[in-house]
Image (cartoon, rainbow, N blue to C red):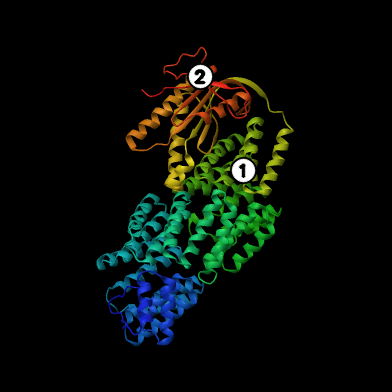
Amino acid sequence: MVDAEPGAVMSTARSPTLEAGRGAISRHAWKEGFDFLSDADRAEPLLPDDLERLAEAAWWTGRLAACIEARERAHRGYLETGNHRRAGYQAIELARDYFSKREGAVARGWLNRAERLLAPEPECVETAWFARTQAVIAFEGQHDPDSALVLARRALDIATRLADRDLMALGLHDQGRILAALGRVDEGVALMDEATVAALAGELTPWTTAAIYCNTIQSCEGVADYRRAREWTEAAKRWCERQAIAGFPGMCRVYRAEIIRLKGGWAEAEQEARRACDELREFNVGYAAAALYEVGEIRLRMGDFAAAEDVFRQAHELGRDPQPGLAMLRLAQGKPEAALTLITQALADQTRDRLHRARFLPATVAITTAAGDRTAAAAAAGELAEIARTYGTPALEASAAYALATVALADGDPASARRDLKRSVQLWQDVDAPYETALARMLLGEACQAVGDVENAALEVEAARSAFERLGAVPDAQRATQLLGSIAAGPRLATQSESKTFMFTDMVKSTSLVDAIGDHAWQDVLRWHDQTLRTLVARHGGEEIDHAGDGFFIAFGSVQEAVACAVDIQRTLAEHRRTHGFAPQVRIGLHATSALRRGKGFSGKGVHLAARLVAQAGPDDILVSQASLRGASLRVPTSEPKTLNLQGLADPVVAVSVRWRP
């Protein structure tokens, strides 16, 4: 902390260098402050309060050894002057630093000293910090959320009486994340959100702001709320960049790497993880090990087993349990018995809380199923489903549905497996996790094949293989190719001609919109757009054939249904724009034709014409080929015909615009 607490020994200005260092720290210019204060210290040893400033600057610039040295000197200085409060506070800070180094015995020694120094003191800021530290240790170190909640409330009570904004925000936030871990997610999130208001408003010191950001992201990932984790990771990244700091960004990067990996950006995720490891290896060993583990997960998915083994080993050397990644690596290497031994022991060791066990249960289901232990697989899947019901986040529910389907398929119940897998696919799509979506689709293909639905089996496995190839998941792409071969060896997929009216929709200037509002707001807009259009399509009897990016491919039984739906879409968007101030502009193309149906998909010249037609439509336009309207009775007028030359089609097409505005 840079703010002097009551009773602190204050240094007097002794040189321009010292004053420059103090000024740099006050404006959070950490590197500049570190350099000036180090120079001043070499000229004349700093007094304790300036050593605190030097330690903070060292922490923010990733110099943990220098930070610890300055704190130890400050601690001695305060003891020599009889200031036990500040000496006790420095002992708390040193305990935190040694925990970061994974030197638990030393850290506990400093905590014991802090307790001895602060026990005789009256209620003060330092005693509140000690109570808060006890709460964190109970929650994060001892995995005792019930005791942690009691301690966090005590820390908040003291902070409230002392009117300390940092401790009040931390106390609220600690209570929130503990409640979320206990399964009281809504209650916990509300408290965390309340605490983050102060951080967002710039009311708190940098360390408290960083702690709240970091713990929020950790809590979101803990309950598998990846959407919130993604949003807070980006917010923390922007804050770090404004602060020009080194140590904390590396910690943020570990979380960011996991989020990017989940979204399918594996190369970028690995780059972030390796960069985090470089920044943190001398600063926070635990986070550095977590970064290495993340690299191992990526390399495993890519099929680079040697590299995965190497980084899992490095993570283990730094103190990070390499499971479940290493167990899944053994399974991928064709060593199910070794995989079973590893995952069984790893799960047995995870007695601390349900959320942590949830990270091991999917691998347990996969490995025990492969090993033929259906009883163990069913037990693990059931436990995961119970955890998902308690916490209710989409990723946990998607993972549980996939696990239950795996067991059902192994037990010879493909119909149940198919129901669970359809839900898993949808949930993983909502989370925006392409690899997990593809895994669920491939297993769905197996379930479809098992009930004789070879058309949908091929469609699902083809979609999975395409996703695996885009991601670079070589082993999974190979498995998908093999599965397609077995499907093709069965009955051939039937094709038949059907008369449909095809609709293509496209959001206008979506790229510019993303640039204007940012990725997270864009995801909210896209989610609302998709839900709105799907509701209207279902109302008018349309069949969703495909959805790519911000556009839909829909089939209708008649042109009247298609036009009515298109009008409903445009009017709904216009009304939302009028009442809420914004809705994206959408253009729509319609064409009635005969096309070949293959499973769920359609192909043929008419489909291409409809797809090209939407590209000629303007914002808020409904463009229909004139040939589609022959004999149709519409309830809305149309424009004068216009002749269009469509890309890829030799003959021009005559089209009209539907005048949909009332």
Q: Quadrant of residue 455?
A: top right
Identify the element where label 2 is drawn.
helix
Above/below status of 316 relative to 378? below
Observer able to see residue 372: no
Instruction: Identify the residue position indicated by label 1 in the image.
Output: 467
Above/below status of 365 relative to 557? below
Q: Nearer the viewer, residue 474 or 25?
A: 25
Q: Residues within 10 Å of mark 2 (few under 14, many from 20)?
A: many
Above/below status of 603 relative to 297? above
Side of 455 relative to 200 (left or right): right
Q: Count every numbered label the image shows and give the total.
A: 2
Residue shown at 58% from the left, 59% from the top: 271
Q: Nearer the viewer, residue 41 or 168?
A: 41
Mark 1 or 2, closer to the camera: 2
Q: Amino acid at mark 2?
A: Val
Residue 562 screen position, x and y as percent: 49, 22
Q: Amino acid at mark 1?
A: Ala
Observer able to see residue 57: yes
Q: Which mark is residue 559?
A: 2
Q: Earlier in the sequence, mark 1 or mark 2?
A: 1
